[in-house]
Image: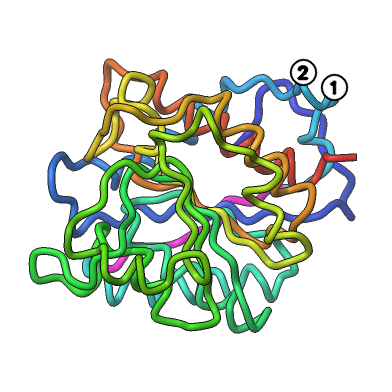
Amino acid sequence: MFEHDRIPAPDDAPKVHIIPFGLEDTVSYEGGTAKAPQAIFRAAKEVELFDDELWQEPIRKFNEEIVETGPIAPTIEEGMGQLEDLVRKTLDAGAFPMTLGGEHSITPGAIKPLVEKHGELHLLQFDAHADLRDMFRGDYYSHANAMRRCLDDDRVTLTSFGIRNISRTEIPFYEEHKDERIRIHWAREKAKWDVEEAVEHLRGKPVYVTFDVDGFDSSLMPATGTPEPGGMFWDDVIPILRRTFEIADVVGADIVELAPRPELHGCDFLAAKLCYKMLSYKFALD
């Protein structure tokens, strides 16, 4: 995936399985997420491998493999089962699962093997939307209720950043679980975020990062199905990611909801750089 001017990592370096899973079934505004993995792969070839923050080439610290997924099932229910199997095989191989969606509805399938392995899982969500609906337009599984489906398992908790869109129907569930299983850091309050305090409860715990690219402000990330103004920028996100990778055991991640547009290749690049940054923090924080 990240091939530009690459020096291979040692054979015994940690392994990363990149799982391209462009499932697109319930998008509700603009489509295109099915094309996201390939767009990210193209952009990844342009990502500079030397990280000026970490002052090294993190790519030398891990070996990546793009997983052959085969044809993706046409429905969410089938697709989640398919993704569960892929993540389970990744874990059996001792590798770190990095899934590239596709719509956000894939996350409940991606995390199931990790919950089984660790007995608990703490989601770190970057998103414009709370995704806590029980049903959305008649769908039990949808991009709009991905976090609710994850929280159906009481071994899962949720910490969210960048939320600026929540519906009336989500409020009772949120208020029932607020500060215990659900912690939301609203985008409107980002100037007041204390990053270290906000993620301290994740210290030493198994964490899964789920990054919906609409968490970014729509001026930075217009290539997504449901863009929202008032969102996060790169410099808002990076301190949260770094601190989490420093103190928690991040066991998997996904990047979802990119909807590539031919004239907006910068959005594809942003997703690819985000992927590399997360892997860099996972394996090269010396």
Instruction: Name the spot of residue 189 as percent of width and height, x first.
Output: 45, 35
User: Any magenta on residue 86?
Assistant: no
Which residue is at 57% across, 29% downward?
273
Is 253 left, or right, of 262 in this rendering?
A: right
What kind of element bears circle 2? loop
Is 103 left, or right, of 155 in this rendering?
A: left
Which residue is at 33% across, 54% downward?
130
Cα–Cα gap, marks 1 and 2: 5 Å
Which residue is at 64% across, 62% downward?
207
Closer-to-camera residue (249/178): 178
Q: Can you say whether 102 is above or below 218 in the image?
A: below
Identify the main secondary structure in magenta.
loop
Give amino acid for label 2. Asp
Residue that numbered label 1 is attached to:
55
Q: Can you say whether 46 is above or below 274 in the image?
A: above
What kind of element bears circle 1? loop
Give amino acid for label 1. Trp
Closer-to-camera residue (216/255): 216
Range covered by the magenta-colored residues: 64-73
Which residue is at 34% across, 70% downward?
148
Residue that numbered label 2 is attached to:
52
For the rendered model, the colour scheme is rainbow
Instruction: Name the spot of residue 193 as percent of width and height, x first.
Output: 57, 37
Image quarter hosting the C terminus: top right
Q: Can you say whether 41 is above or below 197 in the image?
A: above
How would you rate the neighbour count of disc 1 (Cα within 10 Å): few for under 14, some for 14-19, many for 20 or more?
few
Tell me if label 1 and label 2 are in contact, CB under 8 Å. yes
Instruction: Name the spot of residue 149 as percent of width and height, x first.
Output: 35, 73
Closer-to-camera residue (149/274): 149
